């Protein structure tokens, strides 16, 4: 079946930070002068809890770091200080396109294309501008800002509605088995999982699994 429209994830699907979050967090701890007492997964797991009361990505991180510090028996102000240092080090424009991204988007030129990314515009727009991806998509849904976060059905449905594409004739490309593959399949989209070196098999079964975007150039996605 011909694919009428394609939706993409952004982070670790089309772009990647020059410095991973773990490196930025290490720099924040170093700047504050304390030994690390939590890791990246610890604060990412709390984002959804504090998102409704946050005003920006920096404020969200401040709330999360403060909560982690409190749970660890530290002064909440230490968490706020760490969040400020993290924000100083994190530049959302310092990203690179992943190999194969431009060629794949060129191969799909002429079809409706959408971006569905977890993250607010303040964090995600600089990535699009820095890599030249702004203007490449017919719709951009900032899940967690415009809609509920992936894997909720709402951001996928919003993008499909914007593109006037029926889910069974569309496809979604992403790197996260839960947020991307499961989320896309829950609305009837075919799914492509970008493995990115991940070992093992996800609990959900994607319609296609590739190690990099280049592999999709000769696939059913672009035929």
Image (tube, rainbow, N blue to C red):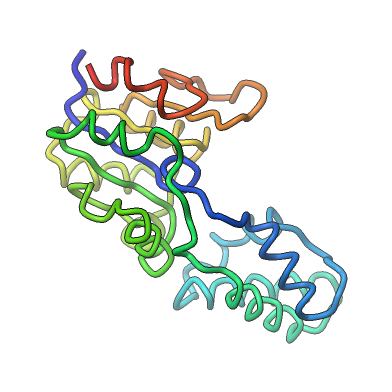
Residue found 75% across the figure and 83% down from its top: 76
The quarter of the displayed image where residue 103 is located: top left
Residue found 70% across the figure and 73% down from its top: 67
Judging depth in this view, the residue of 38 and 33 nearest the camera is 33
Q: Is residue 39 left or right of residue 138?
A: right
Residue found 70% across the figure and 65% down from its top: 25
Percent coordinates x, y for residue 29 in the rendering: 77, 72
Q: Is residue 56 left or right of residue 154?
A: right
The number of discs equals 0
Q: Quadrant of the N terminus?
A: top left
Q: Quadrant of the C terminus?
A: top left
> In the rendered image of this protein, does residue 206 appear above or below residue 162?
above
Judging depth in this view, the residue of 21 and 155 nearest the camera is 21
Residue found 46% across the figure and 32% down from its top: 182
Percent coordinates x, y for residue 50 in the rendering: 56, 68
The quarter of the displayed image where residue 7 is located: top left
Percent coordinates x, y for residue 209 in the rendering: 48, 20
Percent coordinates x, y for residue 221 in the rendering: 29, 21
Q: Is residue 4 left or right of residue 39?
A: left
> In the rendered image of this protein, does residue 166 appear above or below residue 96?
above
Residue extending furthest bottom? 77
Q: Is residue 122 left or right of residue 195?
A: left
């Amino acid at each position: 079946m011909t694919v009428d429209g394609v939706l993409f994830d952004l982070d670790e699907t089309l772009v990647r930070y020059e410095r991973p979050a773990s490196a930025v967090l290490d720099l924040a701890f170093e700047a504050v002068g304390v030994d690390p007492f939590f890791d990246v997964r610890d604060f990412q797991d709390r984002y959804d809890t504090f998102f409704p009361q946050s005003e920006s990505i920096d404020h969200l991180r401040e709330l999360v770091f403060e909560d982690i510090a409190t749970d660890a028996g530290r002064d909440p102000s230490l968490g706020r200080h760490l969040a400020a240092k993290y924000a100083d080090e994190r530049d959302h424009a310092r990203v690179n396109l992943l190999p194969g991204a431009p060629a794949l988007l060129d191969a799909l030129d002429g079809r409706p294309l959408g971006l569905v990314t977890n993250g607010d515009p303040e964090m995600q727009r600089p990535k699009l501008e820095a890599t030249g991806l702004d203007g490449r998509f017919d719709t951009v849904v900032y899940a967690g800002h415009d809609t509920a976060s992936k894997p909720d059905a709402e951001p996928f449905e919003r993008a499909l509605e914007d593109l006037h594409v029926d889910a069974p004739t569309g496809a979604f490309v992403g790197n996260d088995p839960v947020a991307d593959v499961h989320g896309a399949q829950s609305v009837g989209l075919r799914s492509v999982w970008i493995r990115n070196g991940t070992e093992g098999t996800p609990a959900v079964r994607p319609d296609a699994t590739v190690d990099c975007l280049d592999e999709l150039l000769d696939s059913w996605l672009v035929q």
